[in-house]
Image (cartoon, rainbow, N blue to C red):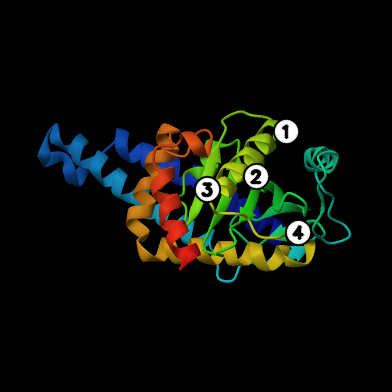
Amino acid sequence: MDRLKHRIVSLLPYAVGLLLGWLLLYPPEALAPLGSWRYLVAALLVLLLLIAFTAAQLAANLPDPITLTPLGEGDEVPPDLLELGARLEALGFVPAGPPYDVGVRPPAVLLPFVHEAERAYSTVFRTRTLPAKTVFDFVSIFDSERGGLTSMAEPAGAALPAAPGGLRQVFPGAGLEEVWRGHREGLGWLRGRGLPARATDAARFVGDFRASFARQRRAFLAAPLRTAVITVWRAATGRTPEMGPLAEQRGAEAELQALLIGHRG
């Protein structure tokens, strides 16, 4: 039953997309009196429905609290996750817990890792969508506990605006090792500006992961429609202001100064 439910949830975005596409091409008869203007009105209606659906999806993917359930004995870890995990271990990471089933919609499988010397976590994440998608990221938390640095290779991972204090680096198409190098350089730049990362260890992973989701949920609930609009725009264009190294991002300096004020206060 759960598998059927997950399959239906994973197909829902495609069904909604087809419905919105149909509505755009074939406006309802109720709009016929508008003549050729009906296509513009239909387009605006589709946009509003898309934003509303995106807001609902974001709310479902930011549950309170987020659940991390160890995989059952009969659940196998996908080979591509194991391969990325082996590459992380070659970089000095160690597992920060068992493989988890993450309670988002649709659910996903997550492998957690930690590099205590570099003060960073890494997660390898595979969605249970059709088709499935595998992504990875690196995360460090600031000493002030007011935010952190996340580095990734997938622009779609930065479509949702970060919570206050959350800095990101997106290296489109980069391999795991290249993103890790960029993350370490970003941490060095921040440390040199007076904002170091705090210690990480396997015992803190679940708490830190849940705290990160809670911060993101609070930020979303503070402005759900605005967040949905930005998310739709970034997803549609594949653009985000967080591309490339932190030191080269136009808005990073202002974020850094705000964080430093809180860190010193």
Front residue of this view, candidates 179 and 126: 179
Q: Inspect the image, locate mark 1, and give the three-letter code of the amino acid beneath it.
A: Glu
Is 68 above or below relative to 8?
Answer: below
Q: Looking at the image, tell me whether mark 1 or mark 4 is earlier in sequence order.
A: 4
Front residue of this view, candidates 84 and 57: 84
Read off the residue under disc 4.
Answer: 100
Q: CA distance from mark 3 to mark 1?
A: 25 Å
Residue neighbourhood size for the residue with mark 4, other residues' Cα within 10 Å, grouped as few (<14), some (14–19), many (≥20): some
Q: Can the viewer see residue 111? A: yes
Q: Inspect the image, locate mark 3, and give the three-letter code of the amino acid beneath it.
A: Arg
Position of the N terminus by quadrant: bottom right
Front residue of this view, candidates 240 and 17: 240
Q: Nearer the viewer, mark 3 or mark 1?
A: 3
Whether pointer 1 and pointer 4 mark residues with C-beta atoms closer than 8 Å, the reply is no
Q: Looking at the image, tell me whether mark 2 or mark 3 is earlier in sequence order.
A: 2
Q: Looking at the image, tell me whether mark 2 or mark 1 is earlier in sequence order.
A: 2
Read off the residue under disc 2.
Answer: 137
Front residue of this view, candidates 213 and 168: 168
Locate residue 171: give its quadrant.
top right
Q: Which residue is farthest bottom?
A: 65
Q: Is residue 17 left or right of residue 105?
A: left
What residue appears at the point 51 percent right and 63 percent down from the top-left corner?
A: 146
Q: Nearer the viewer, mark 4 or mark 2?
A: 2
Q: Looking at the image, tell me whether mark 3 or mark 1 is earlier in sequence order.
A: 1
Q: Which mark is residue 177?
A: 1
Read off the residue under disc 3.
Answer: 193
Q: Nearer the viewer, mark 2 or mark 1?
A: 1
Q: CA distance from mark 3 to mark 4?
A: 36 Å
Whether pointer 2 and pointer 1 mark residues with C-beta atoms closer than 8 Å, the reply is no
What residue appears at the point 60 percent right and 62 percent down from the top-left corner?
A: 143
Q: Nearer the viewer, mark 3 or mark 4?
A: 3
Q: Which residue is farthest right?
A: 73
